[in-house]
């Protein structure tokens, strides 16, 4: 089974500042990696995903993440945050099985709070 | 993109009654769906894997008789919380994975269950 570690439970930043949300996972032969955002009392929205190919992945809302196999990390970054980015962010991992996506293993989440 | 619809979004029920939550894949077929439970300020924990046409696979520690799962068709899975108690109050989220080049998991909007 996979384990996912999000090192920071809360990240407060000021508007227009850069931000990095960290994610590490336990090693595996091949994995699929995801970042999701959750607003209060809502489901999860996909920000970006890594399945294969380029290790730098660009997602929605200006977010990007870099897959680092040697460090088993998949940190999420945004160069300039907005107040609307305030939300809970979850890193998730699935063991790769070709084109079939198995269960997701989630990190505990990081609450990003953007202050004016 | 693919949509997963989950209903109801909120439900309040009396202790001892049963509640059914529906999860539908609106524009794709899902042979597998996942049911997660999320406690306040915590991550998503997989409860069970719903398999179309066969029995669900439950995670360790999840009571099969309390959380009944039925995957009657390729677009519908239901979770029934039987004889609900206040400790069953939580946020329940379903997920359906797509297959192919755009592999990802699509999430329902979640159901906030409150047992009084």
Image (tube, coloured by chain):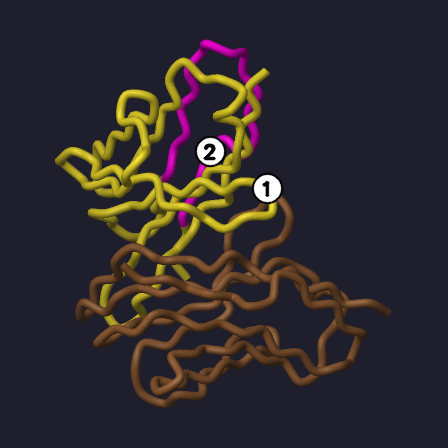
Chain colours: A brown, B yellow
Q: Chain of mark 1?
A: B
The answer to which quarter of the image holds residue B60 is top left
Residue at x-position 62% and y-position 53%: A39
Q: Residue B63 sits in which quadrant?
A: top left
Q: B26 left or right of A99? A: right
Q: Quadrant of the N terminus of chain A?
A: bottom left
C-alpha separation, residue under disc 1 versus residue under disc 2: 20 Å
Residue that badge 2 annotates? B7
Q: Residue at x 22, y 42 (%)?
A: B74
Q: Could you tell me how many numbered marks the image carries? A: 2
* Residue B113 point in image, percent of width and height: 53, 28
Please tell me which residue lies in front, A115 or B75.
Answer: A115
Where disc 2 sits, the SS reads strand
Q: Which residues are magenta?
A: B4-23
Image: B76 above or below B4: above
Residue linked to disc 1: B40
Give the number of the disc on residue B116.
none
Residue B81 versus residue B3: which sits nearer the camera? B81
Q: Is residue A11 above or below residue B70?
A: below
Question: What's the residue at 32%, 34% (across, down)?
Answer: B61
């Amino acid at each position: 089974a996979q384990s996912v570690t999000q090192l920071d439970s809360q990240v407060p930043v000021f508007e227009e500042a850069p931000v990095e949300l960290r994610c590490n996972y336990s090693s595996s032969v091949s994995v699929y990696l995801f970042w999701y955002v959750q607003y209060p009392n809502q489901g999860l929205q996909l920000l970006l995903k890594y399945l294969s190919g380029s290790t730098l992945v660009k997602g929605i809302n200006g977010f990007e993440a870099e897959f680092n196999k040697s460090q088993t990390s998949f940190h999420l970054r945004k160069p300039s945050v907005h107040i609307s980015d305030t939300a809970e962010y979850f890193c998730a991992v699935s063991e790769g099985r070709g084109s079939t996506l198995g269960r997701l293993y989630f990190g505990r989440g990081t609450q990003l709070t953007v202050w004016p | 993109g693919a949509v997963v619809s989950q209903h109801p979004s909120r439900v309040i029920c009396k202790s001892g009654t049963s509640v059914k939550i529906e999860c539908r894949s609106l524009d794709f077929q899902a042979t597998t769906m996942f049911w997660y439970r999320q406690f306040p300020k915590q991550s998503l924990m997989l409860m069970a894997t719903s398999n179309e046409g066969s029995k669900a696979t439950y995670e360790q520690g999840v009571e099969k008789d309390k959380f009944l799962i039925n995957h009657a068709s390729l677009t519908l899975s239901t979770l029934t919380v039987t004889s609900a108690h206040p400790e069953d109050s939580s946020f329940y989220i379903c997920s359906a994975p797509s297959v192919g080049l755009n592999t990802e998991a699509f999430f329902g909007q979640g159901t906030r269950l409150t047992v009084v």
